[in-house]
Each structure stands twice: as C-alpha cells, then as structure tokens.
Amino acid sequence: MRNSALKLGFQFVACAIASYCTTQTALAQKLAGKGLKDYYKSYFPIGVAVAPRNLSGEEGRFIVKQFNSLTPENAMKMGPIHPRPNQYYWQDADSIVSFARHNGLRVRGHNLCWHEQTPDWIFKDSTGKQVSKQVLLQRLRDHIHTVVKRYKGKIYAWDVVNEAIDDNPNKFLRNSLWYQICGEDFIAKAFEYAHEADPKAVLFYNDYNTERPEKMERVYKLLKKLVDAKVPVHAVGLQAHWSLQEPSGTELRNTIEKFASLGLKVQITEMDVSIYPWEKERRPLHPGEKGELTSELEQKQIAKYKEVFDILRQYKKVITGVTFWNVSDRYTWLDEYPVQGRKNFPLLFDTNLQPKKAYYEVVNFKR
Ligand code: GLA
C-alpha cells in the first residue's frame, strides 16, 4: 500500500515535471520561431536594408525569420545602378529583388534622385560642360523610367527624392547640382516620371532629422507645395537615423501628425538608434575614444527603442512600414560614419545576431 502510494506520488511528480518541460519547450520553440515581423503583423511590415552579401547562409535565413520587407542599401542608387550613360548594372539589385520574391518579402526601392551616390556623367556633356535643365530632366526621366519599369509589380514603393532640404535651418532647398541646374522643378518632375513608369507604386519623399521642429517645418513646406500642385507624392519617409538624445516622444508625434495632416502616409525608412549624439561632419577618432555599449548606454537605448515603438504602434493607421538600416550590430554604416573606426551598436540584434534587451522591449507589448 505504502509502496504503491509512493509510486503514484513519483509518477505524479514526473508527470508534472514532464508537462512543465513540454510547456517551457513549446514556449521557447514558439518564441524561437517568431520574428520581429510576426509580433508586428497587425501593425506594419518590418524591413531591413541589405546588400547581396547579407542574403546567403545564416544571415539570409535570419533575415527571412525576422523581417518581411527589404530595401537595397546601395544597389539601386543612381551611381551603382547607372554608372555610365548607356550602361546599367543590374546584378545586385536583381539578386535582392529575386531573394525577396523567393522568400515572400516585399521590396522598397531606394532611391531615384539624390545629391549623393549620383554619377558625375549625368550632369555633364561630352566636353565636360554642365548640361542644360532640359537635358538633365530628360536624363532623369530616362533613368527613372528604365529602373522603375524593370521592377514594376515587384517593388511596391519608391523613395523618389531623397534629402532635398538644406542642412542650414535658414535655407530651404539644398543647393545640389539638381537644384543648380533645374531649380526646384526636378522634385515634382521626378515624382511625375516615377508615376508614369509605375502608376501603382507608392511614391515617397525621404529625409533625415525630420523630427527636429525647424526641419519638420521645411519638409512640410515642400510636401504641401507638392500636394497642392497635385504632384503624385503619396508618402513621406522619416529616415530615423536617431540617437539616445533625439527625437523626443513629442517631436516624433508632432512630425507624424503634421505630415499625416496632408493626407500622406508615413514610413520609418532607415531606422537606427546611435549610442552617440548626432554629428554630421566626418572627423578622426579622438584619442581614448572607443566604441563600447556600456550598461548605462544600453539602458538609454532600451528606453529610446521602447518609447518610439510605443508611439509608432499608436499611429498604425498612418504608418505603413518600419525599416532598419542594416541587419545587426555586426555591421552598421555608423561604424564608419561620421567617425571612421568607432564601433556603434544602433540596432536590435547584437554582433552574433542575437536579440538585444532592446528587442524584447520592442516585442513585449499588449496585443
Ligand atoms: C542616407 C541615405 C541612405 C544611406 C544613409 C547612410 O540616409 O538615404 O541611402 O546612404 O544615408 O548609410
């Protein structure tokens, strides 16, 4: 009698342990199987900027698990994709689009008209003289038509014009060669050409520091002009190269609301949260300056990520996508810029592709 009671007791405990273990394993498996994109399924797609080298092996599988949208980091910029007048280089861009299609991810095209990573030839004639406005607009049209039509139906959104606002708060449009040769017309024209080439594509104006009140006002002024003139601009990209210091929650809300008031959708297009304050000019590494995610910086980064994602979720009606600029802290463009060789840790995954504490804050919310 005592023996069988003991046996029963053991069985009960063994069963309880087994069922606890199964539940834990199931939970771990469930969590292990879930990516960032799954937590945000009823909010917005979660994207990442990639180069072809990111798409194979472990990193490729990791991207498919965590994200459901891709932006080519460089491959579709005018310089890389159209290096000479009659020569396009499609290989990198094609490989990103085909990876996305094969794995069921959407693609944002980036970008069609910018003052950087633009080939010199586009502004010059065969004698090296600057071309006329008419010639430049014709070249812009040819470029946009060729690139957008190639990916029609495969790319759902394009950053059409990137960073046309000046860095000087007292100036309006950037004095780029586009502006010097065409005046502000190049902006509206770029949108018109993109719309002709793919009437279904969602067309974006994309810029940085858009949450700083003075810059927000200037971006708003440009967008309002375009909207009033019935230019086919549909959305605005907040690049979101943020830091522990900015933007504040109020600045972010104000920006989203202000742009949405024009009837535009909003996407976060290039998100990272630098552990250093914003600097624009390149400079050498200071003696003793080393890149380290101290626990103090880590806490601040966790808090900033939590704050901004809490806000983004509240605006899910307006926000149609959030894209990170690079996959993980293993490589970020901020390792080189603006201070070459200063390691940064701005993303949600660490150098081993493991979720950081900030990741858990971002996915831990009431659904
Ligand atoms: C800007 C551009 C991006 C990228 C980043 C830096 O934000 O829009 O394409 O070049 O700078 O990497």
Image (cartoon, rainbow, N blue to C red):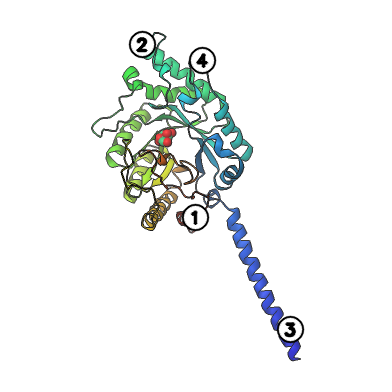
Q: Earlier in the sequence, mark 3 or mark 2?
A: 3
Q: Which secondary structure lies at badge 4?
A: loop
Query: Badge 4: how crowded within 10 Å, few (<14), some, or many (20+)?
Result: few
Q: Earlier in the sequence, mark 3 or mark 4?
A: 3
> Visible in this render: residue 152?
no
Q: Determine the quadrant in which ligand 1 lies.
A: top left
Amino acid type of the residue tagged 1 in the rendering: Val
Cα–Cα gap, marks 3 and 4: 83 Å
Along the horizontal axis of the image, is 15 left or right of 267? right
Classify mark 2 as within 8 Å of ligand 1 or not, answering yes or no: no
The residue at the point 31 percent across, 43 percent down is: 286
Q: Which secondary structure lies at badge 3?
A: helix
- Residue at label 3? 7
Q: Which secondary structure lies at badge 1?
A: helix
Amino acid type of the residue tagged 3 in the rendering: Lys
Residue 2's mark?
Answer: none
Residue 38 screen position, x and y as percent: 56, 50
Q: Earlier in the sequence, mark 4 or mark 1?
A: 4
Residue 149 screen position, x and y as percent: 54, 23
Residue 363's mark?
Answer: 1
* 223 or 210, nearer to the observer: 210
Query: Badge 3: how crowded within 10 Å, few (<14), some, or many (20+)?
Result: few
The residue at the point 39 percent across, 16 percent down is: 123
Query: Badge 2: how crowded within 10 Å, few (<14), some, or many (20+)?
Result: few
Cα–Cα gap, marks 2 and 4: 19 Å
- Residue at label 4? 86
- Residue at label 2? 129
Cα–Cα gap, marks 1 and 3: 44 Å
Residue 243 screen position, x and y as percent: 36, 47
Q: Earlier in the sequence, mark 2 or mark 1?
A: 2
Query: Badge 1: how crowded within 10 Å, few (<14), some, or many (20+)?
Result: some
Cα–Cα gap, marks 3 and 2: 95 Å
